[in-house]
Amino acid sequence: MTWSLLLILALVIFMLRYFFLEPAIPIKLPSVIRQALGYSAPCLLTAICAPIVLLEKSEFKGIIDNPYLWGTLLCVGLALKIRNTLVVVLLTLVGFYLLNAFLN
């Protein structure tokens, strides 16, 4: 990428964020759009995490001996049960390391 392209992209991203975050600019999005934007973070995280959890060198990792999958399921279960981010992260890390030690 050239510097000019990087600067143009940075300017576009800044302007888009500025228009939505600046309180002096009255932009009202329809309720359908606001509701749809609520799903953007989970969709982005799923798109990032799913290949890490399910694939290894472009091949399916498997289910039974996959510590990443079991760690993910543990994390989701703990998050639904506990609802405290710090505790969930710490318990998931401990659980993942134990799973990784037993499965590998």
Image: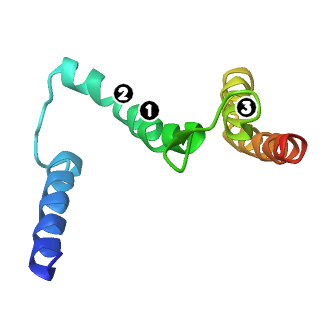
- Circle number at residue 39: 2
Q: Earlier in the sequence, mark 1 or mark 3?
A: 1
Q: Amino acid at mark 1?
A: Pro
Query: Is 79 left or right of 41, judged from the image as shown?
Result: right
Q: Amino acid at mark 2?
A: Tyr
Q: Kindly identify the residue that appears in the image at 68 percent across and 28 percent down.
A: 63
Query: Is 101 left or right of 81, judged from the image as shown?
Result: right
Residue at the disc numbered 1 = 42
Q: Earlier in the sequence, mark 3 or mark 2?
A: 2
Between marks 1 and 3 in the image, the one whose residue lies nearer the viewer? 3
Crowding near pointer 3: few (<14 within 10 Å), some, many (20+)? some
Tell me how far mark 1 sits from mark 3, CA to CA.
19 Å
Image-quadrant location for residue 67? top right
Helix, strand or loop at mark 1: helix
Q: Measured from the top left, where is residue 21 in percent x and y?
A: 23, 49
Residue at the disc numbered 3 = 70
Q: Say which of 68 and 56 sits in front.
A: 56
Helix, strand or loop at mark 3: helix
